[in-house]
Image (tube, rainbow, N blue to C red):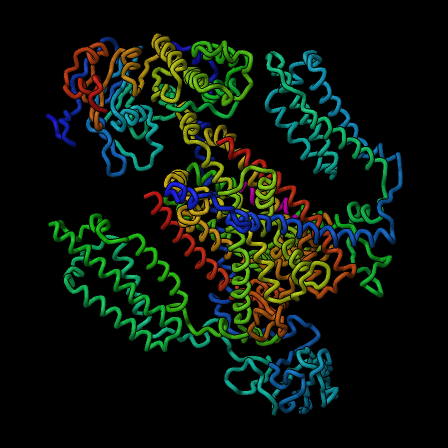
Amino acid sequence: MDPMERLEKKYEPKKTPFFNARNILFFTSLSVILITLGIIQTLLFEAMSFFSQVADARGWFTFEVDATGLSSLGGVSFVLLLLALAGEYIIQFKRDQLERASKDLMLPRKSITTLVLLSPVFVCLGTGSFLLALSLMGLIFVWRRAGKAYLLLSGKSETTPDRSVLYFLGISSLAVLFFSITNNYGGAFGEFFFKTQWTPTGACADRRALCENMSFGVNSLLLTTLQVAFGALFIAVPLGVGCAIYLSEYASPRLVAVVKPTLELLAGVPSVVYGFFAFIYIGPLVVEVGEYAFAQGWIDAPPNVLNPINGAIVVGVMILPLVASMSEDALRAVPNELREGSLALGATKIETTFNVMIQASLSGIIASIILALSRAVGETMAVTLAVGTVAVYTSNMFLPAQTMTAYIAQRVGGDLPFGEIGYLTIFAVGLYLFVITLCLNLLGNKVLSAYREAY
Amino acid sequence: MSEVIGGELVPDSTRDLDIDGELDLMVEDLDLWYGSNQALYGVSLPIAKNSVTALIGPSGCGKSTLLRTINRMNDLIPICRYEGKITKGDLVITNKGADLVNLRKSIGMVFQRPNPFPKSIYENVAYGVRLHHQPKREELDAIVEKSLKRAAIWKEVTDRLHDLGTSLSGGQQQRLCIARTIAIEPDVILMDEPCSALDPIATAAIEELILELKKDFTVVIVTHSMSQAARVSDYTGFMYLGRMVEFNKTEKIFSEPDQELTRRYITGRFG
Amino acid sequence: MKKDIDLLKKRNRARRDLMERAGSTGLALTGLIGMLFLTVLVWQIAKPTFIDGESGQIEPASEFIPESDYILKWDHPTVDENGDLIGEAVVLELSWNDGSPQTHEITITVTGERGLKEDIIVDSNGVSTNEVVVGKKTKFYLLSSLNVPVTVEQLSGPVPAADPTGKPAVGAFVISGEVDVLVADGSLVATPLEIVAWVALLGAILLISVPMPTMLGRLERLGGKERAVKYGSYLLAAATLALGAFTLDAWLGGLCWVMVGVITVRLLEGLTRLRKQGRDPTQFERLKHTITNREGLLMWARMLFAFSMLFIPLAIDIPFLTERYQDIFIPYASGIRSAFFGTVWVMTIAMLVSMPVSIGAAIYLEEYAKATRTTKLIQALVTNLAGVPSIVFGMFGLAIFVKQGGIGLGLGPSILAAGLTMGVMAMPIIVLASQEALRSVPRSLRESAYGVGCTQWQVTRDHVLPSAMPGIMTGSILAMSRIMGEAAPLVVVGAAALVLFDPEPLAGLTGGNLNFTVIPIQIYFWTSEPEHAWHSMAAAASITLILLLAAMNSVAIILREHFRRRLNP
């Protein structure tokens, strides 16, 4: 054979076997999909069999129509949302109409804007209605969009209408309308999502099967969870972000070298240890405060060692390192030139920090807060030990309650037979929890990746 | 006196510092260290009012360091320390107790890479003014317009004042940064290789702008490009290994330099 | 010259300065508060066990059960595994004097049945019964309506387990012996030679990491005796091994000696080299660069030092660590042995399962995957799975691994099921860390490997993976420490509160005793107990857990720092 031909034969490309490195690695990565599908399948399957069991006895979704509800807070929210919808319509399709608006309305003084932006908080505290506050926030959002559009009126830059805002406002106003004219929700879904009574065992002779006395209003657990999670944010965000700013803007490298590992250590302490800490240390402290409040008549029942405040404090301490280290990363990612640029204009350090650095790293900080919120919602052991096991939601945060995760942990603690109603409830609660945290994570990671792209 | 470093005869920093006209800023005998590395050796530099002074030299010769010492930006680097004196009129800049806020207000700086804040164009220019003053909205509008006009960018951005400053092109961003700096009307503007990240057309625009700015401000510019120094500056200082090898009028330096080292650098034999 | 800008109204300078000062102080304070929390946490956890010197005093039962004056507690060697009675019955003598002195004997018999109980009621007429039959592990009460103390004396029967003196000390408090939680004997496990080896290693590390001219000067006198030093260290290692009877700590001590020998020889070589060049060898800055592979040596020495710290100087004979959980009634005699082995097995299985799969997935996503819809989906899933609450993974494990039927594997609440669940939980964390590590390998390395004709797999295997390995290892160790502290999924999977035997790792497949527990679970259940004594145990277990985690994290940090310095010197 010709030597050239022999060589060619030798180096003729071989057929790649099916189990080559690439395919094997691909299969390993498919396991991620398998796990996700497994989680969703498990939760969905068991949760649906829970809902269908309840639905067999009580129907899927029932409600009563009551038009008088329109005169309540729900009706007010509906009107607010309609106003917002109208404003958004003008912004997107009748932009030239904006010129007729007065300048003071569109671009008021900064102090007035701040006051208006804070108003939903006051409304929420005053009326106790989240819905009203949310609708007000929608209206304010549209108002600020209008202000921006008004500013741009002079410019020639043409912005395409952002329909998604319109659709969102439309759908939410319809939803608010629906809920303001209906009440007494029942059936599997109506009960689960809209009732605030969680007695999954009930006073029944046979606890395994569904009976009349059982009630599955998950809001009882959800509201406690939110109390704990937002309470935790209330502690962790100011401290964590403050700590991050101090570390990245002020602290000497030597101090950072001490504090950063400490933060990592704090982040690594297991949640059950935090739970123990809450149980033996924070609980009694909170009780002392609660007893004072009770003596003053601010709360209507004497405090208990296990309570949501206790949980909020301990979860706040737990997520503090997460907020601090992620916010610090975000602040460090801001190019040094921005800092120098501001200082070179004669700004003081604190002015630079608040006017430039925070604004530049805002989305990173927000992402860290969202992810911390997700962590707080999903936190289990610490809240199980700190908040208690009484699945009754009250606005008095000194009384024992139960979060979603704590319910699951407590319920499976006793050996639950496969398939009975109590076993199924944990999957319904778990699915709800999974969806909430997944949404938060998706949002947080999206904000974070947008931020990473910016720098 | 001179020292042989790396086979090169390096003279000590020059004392031959004659300028025409009024003196704005004076650097005297500046020594500077980063940790244990000395970066500047007894550098002196006079800066004349309403002129452009260029600093040239190979990379790492300390020209940016010198510039950053003038408005004390080097204070941000923890390991940096210096001895010597920089004066501006009666004010001793290098004093420990010097008021950095007022100092930096009167000595503005433009950086190597354009660094507009992540705010709108309007806010970028207004930021510095708001730091020091409480202007009414009309006054602020006027200042923003005036500064953008002086920075020769007004025509390009007049329609999009409320777009993000970062959405502009590189050359426009750099002019925006200059507008931001001149909005607070400093006496001196320090420019740290302002054109190194820009294309030739944007560079030409900035150079034109520098010549324009000379009428109202004192400009100190660090540059890599000798032709740029020759085009825009009145005085030129050549630095090498932390020493001010030669300082003189630009025409003199580029036609008949006193030092052999300078001659070899500007004819491209090294560096 | 008056400038236009000076016509504007000025901001108050004093106020700006004040804001600056107030702001920086405030921010520093927030930072401090974080540190304060840590201090309080550690203090509050350590205080009950260590600082107060908590040592086995059980509070009067009345504190918890108001209607009872005393609680009687025994370990139950009296009942064998089938529940049959082995030993004799317990005979107590109760006596009191409320005007008319009375003495009564009560015979207590324990049966295998649980929950059988009969309280003994004492009043001025005497005792309610003289023969009590109770089930094992059942509380029953001695209730007294007298207002004088009752003396309880044990006449015969097994000794209460928690009394170390062997005396049937049945008194007002039934268990009144002093049983320290953590330092019962306080004796060191390690032999003196091992400790010397460990200290010598510390000295050697110091010698090559900080300048100490006098010490180096002294060491220089050994110059030329490198062989002697080398064989001397081997000899010492052999002696340590022999003295320590070839246990783990003896091996570690031996390794310490060898390491000391290697470091000394390298140092001496460096000193000689410098001396030959005519430079002062005790000048540390120069010496640093003359020691062969100083960085690698330092890393191994530090890791050995950190690892053997747990086994040589800290290896005190602590019953808490070596004892099993004794009984539901005896706090201070219990230990975390079963829980510790449970933790070790769960982590081993989790890592065996998740590391190959996760690293494979990371390599695929970083090196092979094109930006198709599938890979984008996988990437998004990985990122978001890392944030799913751990308890959801527990429910996944419960349905897939624990329960039988449907898609369940039916492994039962066993170590195997727990390990698999934890492995699944660790996966996204390891994938993300490995991806980060792979991404940080410079593109030029890949390009140069392709440039000499490597296939993609060869590039990955021979060039990318070795450079990324430290990052991957660090990520894996951190994932390990994360799952080590995680309790929620295992509560769902079904870890037990009370495990009296060492766990069997494969019981899920082969049958046998499924029961297992891990340290966090043990802390959880001990915290849930009403009596304060258990809280001390929980505190001791917490401190143990934190120490273990800190040790693992420090190994990860040492690795990370070493490779960071090697990659960008």
Quadrant of the rendered image containing residue C196: bottom left
Q: Is residue C175 above or below residue A362?
A: below
Q: Nearer the viewer, residue C152 or A168?
A: A168
- Relative to B114, A45 lies left or right: right
Which range is magenta?
A228-240
Q: Nearer the viewer, residue C188 or C402?
A: C402
- Relative to C351, A1 lies left or right: left
Q: Is residue C283 above or below residue A439?
A: below
Q: Residue at x 31, y 10 (%)?
A: B50
Q: Main secondary structure of the magenta part?
A: helix
Would residue A321 be visible to someone looking at this image?
A: no
Instruction: Report how many numbered discs are placed on residues in the image.
Output: 0
Q: Nearer the viewer, residue B160 or C247?
A: C247
Q: Position of residue A189 (x, y in %)?
A: 80, 47
Q: Residue at x 74, y 88 (%)?
A: C129
Q: Position of residue B95 (x, y in %)?
A: 28, 28
Can you say which quadrant of the picture contains the C terminus of chain C? Answer: top left
- Relative to A311, A395 lies left or right: right
Q: Is residue C232 above or below residue B188?
A: below
Tell whether position A400 is magenta. Answer: no
Quadrant of the rendered image containing residue A412: bottom right
